[in-house]
Amino acid sequence: MRSQAKLRGIYTPNIVPLDSRGEIHERELRRYVDWLIAKGVHGLYPNGSTGEFTRFTAEERVRIMEIICDQVQGRVPVLAGAAEANVKETIRACETYYELGAAAVAIVAPYYYKLSPRAVYAYFKEIADHTPIDVTLYNIPMFASPIDVPTVQRLAEECPKIIGIKDSSGDLPHMIRMIQAVRPRRPDFSFLTGWDAALMPMLLIGCDGGTNASSGVVPELLVKLYDLTLAERLDEARELQYEIVTLFDAMIYTAEFPDGFRTAVRLRGFDTGAGRQPLTPDQQAELSKLAHKLQCLLAQHGFTDEPAGGCAAAGPADDDIARIVNAVVAELKQRGLG
């Protein structure tokens, strides 16, 4: 049986570069993987939400994993998204990714059908009883059936193959309740936050790391925030968290997810291509405006040059309004109303 170290640190839910035909751009994906590892991320997380797993075929998802595992060559662990439309296909994906060398898989609770906690438990129990690879639960209530605390606790106590949870709700009290319920009996269980805007506070209350889309754009900053927080250099960490929130908000709220992140990765020098979700002309124009804003934000850290014409500083009133709007949108999404 393959041994598994506890999942810790920053895992990048990477986008998949596409060529002019909308097909997987293998050369650029390999270059992107090498860049992320060189920038210090602790692991990769392909076939997740940021990787647009639902927009690729099952065969393409396997091909993405083949490319990434081959390129990684064991330098960092690979946490593979293995969510398929039913339990049989999900177990098959677990078997395939185990053979390819993934360290573990992340599986979202069933989506489309709204399921009860008992049904969510039964789904993961069936997978845990038949998978050859360790499993990380993936709680993303805005897209799939939520995984409540009693269900996490029961699965952790009954299923040794379930080794952690990635929670993208951004709900700090929920994370505290999970840690309180699970860690006394399963100190090996990993808690990872998928909400970039709360990485520092999540680490402070006991999370082991994060699966953060922003780390695919500015891996230097997310790794630095992780290191500063663990070193208890909290004033520096807090200022960096504020800067990451500004960038994260621009990428996640100003465009169709994850097009904002794809656009930002392009600004870091990669031929990402267009996403597979068609956009209207108005959306295309908005994405061009976002690219200008993102280039200005990245230029502040020396990651890009300023765009032609420079960057106009937003006034305090604009900043305040943007923060209020983003806070309201985030709260609505968290409550399932966004």
Image (tube, helix red, strand yellow):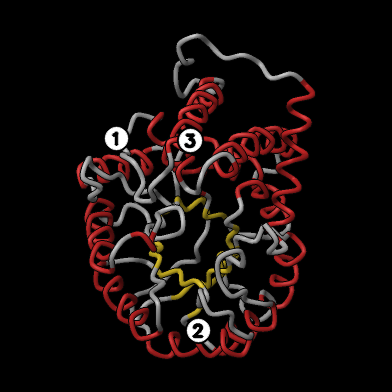
- Neighbor class of circle 1 (other Cα within 10 Å; few <14, some 14-19, many 20+) is many
Quarter occupied by the N terminus: bottom left
Query: In the image, residue 90 lies at what x, y percent?
Result: 37, 79
- Find residue 267 and report its image quarter: top left
Mark 1 vs 2, N-terminal side? 2
Q: Residue at x 33, y 81 (%)?
A: 89
Question: Disc 1 and disc 2: Cα gap in Å?
Answer: 37 Å
Q: Nearer the viewer, residue 122 or 128?
A: 122
Q: Is residue 17 left or right of residue 174?
A: left
Query: Which residue does the numbered mark 1 point to in the structure image?
Result: 271
Q: Which is closer to the viewer, label 1 or label 2?
A: 1
- Neighbor class of circle 2 (other Cα within 10 Å; few <14, some 14-19, many 20+) is many
Query: Which residue does the numbered mark 3 point to in the structure image?
Result: 282
Q: Residue 124: which numbered mark, if any?
A: 2
In the image, residue 251 sits, relative to residue 293, either above or below, namely: below
Mark 2: amino acid: Phe
Question: Disc 3 and disc 1: Cα gap in Å?
Answer: 23 Å
Query: In the image, residue 101 lies at what x, y percent?
Result: 28, 66
Quarter occupied by the C terminus: bottom right
- Find residue 168 and report its image quarter: bottom right
Mark 3: amino acid: Asp
Mark 1: amino acid: Asp
Secondary element under disc 3, as helix, strand or loop, is: helix
